[in-house]
Amino acid sequence: MQREYLVRIVDDDVGFLNSQRFLLEIDGHHVATYRSAEEFLQKDDFRKPGCLILDVRMPGMTGLQLQDILEQRGSFLPIIFLSAHGDINMAVHTLKHGAFDFIPKPASPERLKDAVRKALEVSSRHFDEMDEMRGRREKFAQLTQREQEVLTLVAEGMSNKDIAEKLFISLATVKMHRLNACKKLGISSAVEAAHFLRDMEEK
């Protein structure tokens, strides 16, 4: 699926915002800039694919506080911290909380562009996985309720006979529902059924 990725930059330094925007647009990226974490939260849809370049120290909400909020909201947006005020402990803290990278200012253009490209690759993989998960859920939802019940028990390792007894239906009926469910989902074994259901929930 072809997607448009957005690179966000949040920094209170207007000159820095403009220079980095120019740098990344020349590199072929779509870029949005925000002068504060509050403005970013108000205007940006952080669920859109892309990444975030974030300063640490800003008036009002800090970059670390914004990272915490995004973490609480379940954001998968890769964050690249770019700061002149960082130290090892701060870098470790941000990375432990899911930041993609921590780059001291001033960063070389190539260092920043490389980090952005890699962060966008991570974002792309995440959204591919989300698309796959949604596709699996849509397929599963198309099964009848009985087919879902039978397939779930198959995935748990139960035999056709045990499923029939558990659901109070005939063995032939179990086989029919199992065959129909597997055909609709494109699977052929209990192991594949288990993998299908696991991947549908975990990604």
Image: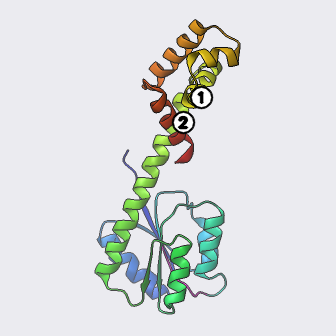
Residue 65, image x, y percentages? 64, 78
Q: Local crowd at mark 1 within 10 Å, few (<14), some, or many (≥20)?
A: some
Figure label count: 2
Q: Name above or below for residue 105 compared with residue 129.
A: below
Question: Which quarter shows the N terminus?
Answer: top left
Residue 5, image x, y percentages? 41, 59
Question: Which residue: 56% across, 80% down?
Answer: 93
Question: Which residue: 48% across, 37% down?
Answer: 195
Question: Which residue: 59% across, 71% down?
Answer: 40
Instruction: Inspect this view and state whether residue 39 appears.
Output: no
Drawn side of residue 112 relative to residue 60, left or right: left
Residue 192, image x, y percentages? 45, 31
Magenta extent: 53-58
* Mark 2 and mark 1 residues within 8 Å of each other at the beta carbon: yes
Tell me which secondary structure the magenta stretch mostly adopts.
loop
The residue lying toward the viewer, choosing from 136 and 31, is 136
Type of the residue with mark 2: Leu
Q: Tag 2's secondary structure?
A: helix
Q: Local crowd at mark 2 within 10 Å, few (<14), some, or many (≥20)?
A: some
Q: Name above or below for residue 180 compared with residue 130.
A: above
Question: Which residue: 31% across, 73% down?
Answer: 114
Type of the residue with mark 1: Thr
Q: Which residue is tagged 1?
A: 152
Drawn side of residue 49 relative to residue 27, left or right: right
Residue 147, image x, y percentages? 59, 20
**Sequence-wise first label, 2 or 1:** 1
Q: Which residue is tagged 2?
A: 197
| Mark identifier at residue 188 | none
User: Disc 2 and disc 1: Cα gap in Å?
Assistant: 8 Å
Q: Name above or below for residue 75 compared with residue 181.
A: below
Please identify the quarter of the rendering in which residue 59 is found. bottom right
Q: Tag 1's secondary structure?
A: helix
